[in-house]
Image (tube, helix red, strand yellow):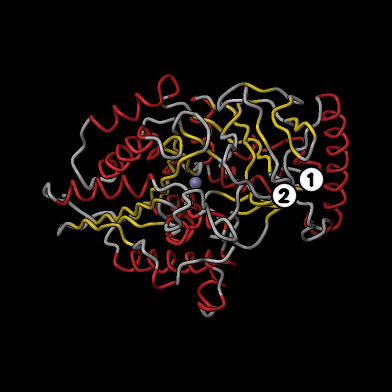
Amino acid sequence: MRCEVEPNRCSVPRTIGVLEAEAAGPTLIVIGGVHGNEPTGVRAAEKVISRLNSNGQIARGRCVALTGHRRALADPDGHTRYLEEDLNRLFTPERVKEALRCNRQSLSPDMIELAEIVACLEAEAERARGPMYLIDIHTFSSRGTPFAATEDAIRARRFCRGFGLPMVLGFEEELHGLLSDYFTNRFGGVSVVVEAGRHGEQAAERIAEATLMRALELTGLIEPGIEALEVLKKAAGARAGRIYDVRYRHVIKNPDFKMLDRVHSFARVHVGEHVADEGGCAQRTPESGLMFMPNRQKHKRPGDDGYFIVRRVGGVWLALSAWLRDRAWIHRALPRFLPGVRRRGASGHELLVSPQIAAVMKRDLFHLLGYRLVRHDGELHLNRARRLAVGMQAIVRSVGLMLAGLVAGGERRILAEESPQDWIVRRHHLDVLDEQDS
Ligand SMILES: [Zn+2]
């Protein structure tokens, strides 16, 4: 599908509006419509900006509201999510470099959007007179509770909690090239994705508006109130403030993918449960947990998200995790004393984990210690007995390697530098930045 709209004649403007105070302060970037079939965030931003413009503006800092996929938003069809590639999967360092380097004429319409958005963000970073924040507003296709998603760094968690919505961590491990992830890693700012509700519903627009007001309060650009938070908490109902971790993503292989009608967001599902039909077969989930964002979009393409499985994370676990990741000695000890785990690169923030070890420890341990999975081959879904067997094997092998390593001068010496099967785990960028600042 080619873009019908000439790059420079798109009817949707890039900037929705700007609010700026004389007093220096944080920069809040709001973006809506990164998916063209989700204009809710754009409409909410228009309303909030015009209301504040006629209402004495903001106390400090700067707020810029941008549109996401202008060309897809401009399509009267209303169902155009992207043109050739999902814009919200293009924000990888490689694709960004390509978008900025190449001649516009040779870029696909989605890549032109990427180049334009990156240019806006760079310009904002250039003029920023304080910390930067990004709020990326989306909507989803099935019924469900609105939620906020962020990276599991301490600063991001704290900020995200302020919205009173259910908080979902770990999307960036399953999805590569997210705008939010790019923003955090490029500019060292907190980014929050808010899924405000179902496409096109009035309720979703109210949630999106409340989200923007709350973001302005949390960043200190306006004085805090209670109204926005109340709207968000009410929409979240019993799930207000709960925290979930993404455990699995089903990737659509066949465009005939169809979720079963009885499967709803946050419904409990068990391993092997029939949750969707795809390519004439029953699609069974490989993970137990809570069904999340089942895809009921009108148009589905291979590579799109079918559904996610999430699990609830307890407050004690999160507090323990915050405490543990703050201990510098833990990060030093991991590659030294954990068999099959070794440093990757010179920074000391990235580790290689041999796949047998990863199968036993699974992602929980790394999450607990403040690492995100950068490369993993999905969870190995082993039953308890099999995991024990693999674990014993791995431990015996690793102890052997350690002993051999003592003779040869270190485990690193005898383990291959990096194999494509190795997991790569990395400390959260914001945690590292905050540690360096303290
Ligand atoms: Zn979206």
The three-letter code of the residue at mark 1 reads Pro
Q: Nearer the viewer, residue 111 or 378?
A: 111
Residue 339, by quadrant, is top right
Marker disc for residue 118: none
Q: Secondary structure at mark 1?
A: helix
Instruction: Name the residue tied to disc 1.
Output: 355
Tell me whether the residue at label 2 lies in contact with that at label 1, contact meaning CB atoms closer than 8 angstroms.
yes
Q: From the viewer's perspective, tell me whether residue 206 is left or right of residue 351.
A: left
Tell me the quarter of the picture where residue 306 sits: top right
Local crowd at mark 2 within 10 Å, few (<14), some, or many (≥20)? many
* Residue 94 place in picture, x, y as percent: 59, 67
- Of 231 and 437, the residue lying toward us: 231
Q: Is residue 123 above or below residue 382?
A: below
Q: In the image shown, does 276 or 221 lie closer to the viewer?
A: 276
- Identify the residue shown where x is 59% and y is 61%: 84
> Is 438 above or below relative to 395?
below
Amino acid of disc 2: Trp
Q: CA distance from mark 2 to mark 1?
A: 6 Å
* Left or right placement of residue 247 versus residue 400 in this view: left
Indicate which disc, 2 or 1, sits on the residue closer to the N terminus: 1
Q: How many marks?
A: 2
Some atom of ligand 1 lies within 8 Å of the CB belonging to the residue at label 2:
no
The residue under label 2 is 423
Q: In the rendered view of the protein, which quadrant contains the N terminus?
A: bottom right
Q: Secondary structure at mark 2?
A: strand
Image check: 25 left or right of 391? left
In the depicted structure, whether residue 357 falls above or below residue 15: above
432 lies above or below 286 = below
